[in-house]
Image (cartoon, rainbow, N blue to C red):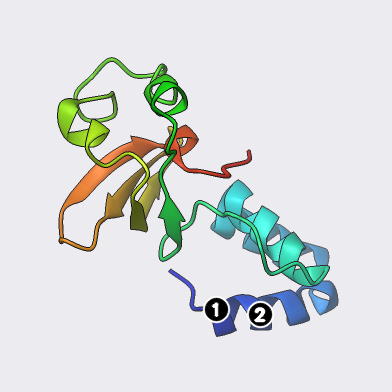
């Protein structure tokens, strides 16, 4: 999990890195980190990035929210009654996984797994 100042520092240094260091950085931060880094490099500090430490909001439309789980039928990543109660709420991403899922912590301390598609404003 990188702090906001670490992201800004990386954005400042990125162009001066050799291609091997850039490649290693891109591999380490993944696709969502690459999106965030590019946004910071061009001066765009807004946007939704699915990265540990980011505060995000879950979709608020019931249809869109339910549809966001369509890739999964299991209880861990699929839709459940407990997850439906979290629709539209904010949470902090604790971890992300290679299957494009994440673990989110809510203000009440509960952690729940979701697909990336459940995040309002998510872009691949």
**Quadrant of the frame with the C terminus:** top right
Q: Is residue 23 among the parts visible in the rendering?
A: yes
Residue at 44% of width from left, 55% of height from top?
56
The tag on residue 8 is 2
Residue at 33% of width from left, 56% of height from top?
91
**Quadrant of the frame with the N terminus:** bottom left
The residue at which mark 1 appears reads as 4
Q: Nearer the viewer, residue 17 or 77?
A: 77
The tag on residue 116 is none
Q: Position of residue 94 (x, y in %)?
A: 32, 58
Q: Badges 1 and 2: C-beta atoms under 8 Å apart? A: yes
Q: Is residue 94 among the parts visible in the rendering?
A: no
- Give the left or right position of residue 81, taking residue 16 as reference: left
Neighbour tally class for label 2: few under 14, some 14-19, many 20 plus, Cα within 10 Å:
some
Q: Position of residue 77 (x, y in %)?
A: 28, 29
Q: Nearer the viewer, residue 107 or 74?
A: 107
Check disc 1 and report its element: helix, strand or loop.
Answer: helix
Neighbour tally class for label 1: few under 14, some 14-19, many 20 plus, Cα within 10 Å:
few
- The answer to whether 80 is drawn above or below residue 73 in the figure is below
What is the C-alpha distance between the residues marked 1 and 2? 6 Å
Q: Nearer the viewer, residue 95 or 59?
A: 59
Residue at 50% of width from left, 51% of height from top?
50
- Give the left or right position of residue 110, taking residue 88 as reference: left
- The answer to whether 10 is drawn above or below residue 111 in the figure is below
Q: Picture quarter containing residue 109?
A: bottom left
């Amino acid at each position: 999990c990188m702090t906001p100042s670490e992201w800004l520092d990386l954005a400042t240094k990125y162009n001066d890195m050799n291609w091997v260091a850039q490649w290693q950085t891109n591999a380490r931060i993944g696709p969502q980190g690459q999106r965030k880094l590019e946004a910071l490099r061009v001066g765009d500090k807004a946007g939704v990035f699915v990265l540990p430490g980011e505060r995000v909001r879950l979709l608020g439309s019931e249809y869109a929210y339910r549809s966001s789980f369509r890739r999964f039928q299991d209880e861990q990543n699929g839709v459940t009654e407990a997850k439906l109660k979290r629709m539209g709420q904010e949470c902090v991403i604790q971890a992300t996984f290679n299957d494009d899922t994440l673990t989110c912590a809510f203000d009440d301390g509960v952690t729940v797994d979701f697909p990336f598609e459940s995040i309002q404003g998510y872009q691949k």
